[in-house]
């Protein structure tokens, strides 16, 4: 083969190769151009995975003085404070509250009084000694009478007082949330084991702050100032931030008025 023929052959191969490479390079771009654009969120889809206050009932189970003394996985003062936040939130947002105790006259002791103090609309359902509240028909009937299908539960012990009715309610088709920091257990091991069983059983673990934020949704509402106070309870550092902001605003107003 002559030098000219070799050059011509090499030129043809180079041209073909460039064409192939351009074809490969442009294909992803072509595919991207053919894809449908991502649909924008609409009011009908926004926030549908979050708690709906209109479908929620708060169940506070066995927050009893005697049982508090056995709690080791969370500071009892924090547990009580978070339970108070839930009671106050339910009052502000008009969420039904049901409380219960298995044996308040025994060693487990009476319910913490703050629940009914800050949620005066709460309904107390006495039990006849049943450990599992869902085995008491009066309690189950009280829940069903609300007509709501989303249950937010908290109580002491988490591994018993919360988990047993949570599993039963889930089996009946309710959507159940367990507020882990408004509940307590005798040990960290019990708490971790319970959390695993919640997840396996289809129960949604959550926190007081998450419940507060999910039901709050927007500051553009008439209850905003009352809800803001609850954030200060669930997070004392947030209260300090709010105080600093208010003081700064006062200083600004004073400087403008001078």
Image: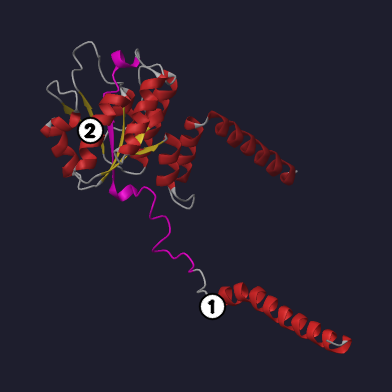
Image vertical order of residue 72 relative to residue 182, above or below: above
Q: Nearer the viewer, mark 2 or mark 1?
A: 1
Q: Secondary structure at mark 1?
A: helix
The disc, 2 or 1, on the residue closer to the chain's N-terminal end is 1
Q: Residue at x 28, y 49 (%)?
A: 55
Callout 2: 10 Å neighbours few (<14), some, many (20+)? Answer: many
Range of magenta residues: 39-68
- Seen as rendered, the residue at the extreme right is 3
Identify the mark at residue 165; answer none if there is no mark: 2
Q: 6 or 52: which is nearer to us?
A: 6
Quadrant of the rendering where the N terminus is positioned? bottom right
Q: Is residue 231 above or below residue 46?
A: above
The foreground one among 19 and 169 is: 19
**Is residue 84 visible in this depiction of the protein?**
no
User: Residue at 14% of width from left, 30% of height from top?
Assistant: 135
Please state the horizontal and vertical placement of residue 3, each as a whole percent of the image. Answer: 88, 86
Q: Residue at x 42, y 35 (%)?
A: 207
- Checking the image for residue 34, the label placed there is 1
Instruction: State the separation of the CA atoms marked 2 and 1.
Output: 51 Å
């Amino acid at each position: 083969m002559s030098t000219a023929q070799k050059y011509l052959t090499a030129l043809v191969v180079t041209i073909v190769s460039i064409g192939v490479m351009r074809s490969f390079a442009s294909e992803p771009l072509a595919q991207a151009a053919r894809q449908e654009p991502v649909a924008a969120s609409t009011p009908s889809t926004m926030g549908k995975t979050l708690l709906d206050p209109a479908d929620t009932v708060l169940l506070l189970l066995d927050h009893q003085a005697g049982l508090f003394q056995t709690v080791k996985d969370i500071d009892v003062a924090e547990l009580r404070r978070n339970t108070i936040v839930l009671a106050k939130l339910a009052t502000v947002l008009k969420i039904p509250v049901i409380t219960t105790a298995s044996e308040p006259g025994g060693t487990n002791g009476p319910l913490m009084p703050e629940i009914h103090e800050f949620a005066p609309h709460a309904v107390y359902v006495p039990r006849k000694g049943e450990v599992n509240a869902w085995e008491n028909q009066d309690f189950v009937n009280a829940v069903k009478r609300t007509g709501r299908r989303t249950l937010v539960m908290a109580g002491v012990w988490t591994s018993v007082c919360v988990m047993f009715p949570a599993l039963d309610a889930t089996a009946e088709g309710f959507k159940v949330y367990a507020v882990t920091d408004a509940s307590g257990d005798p040990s960290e091991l019990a708490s971790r084991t319970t959390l695993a069983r919640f997840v396996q059983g289809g129960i949604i673990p959550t926190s007081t702050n998450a419940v507060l934020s999910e039901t709050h949704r927007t500051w553009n509402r008439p209850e905003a100032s009352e809800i803001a106070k609850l954030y200060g309870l669930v997070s004392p550092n947030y209260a300090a931030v709010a105080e600093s902001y208010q003081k700064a605003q006062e200083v600004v107003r004073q400087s403008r008025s001078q």
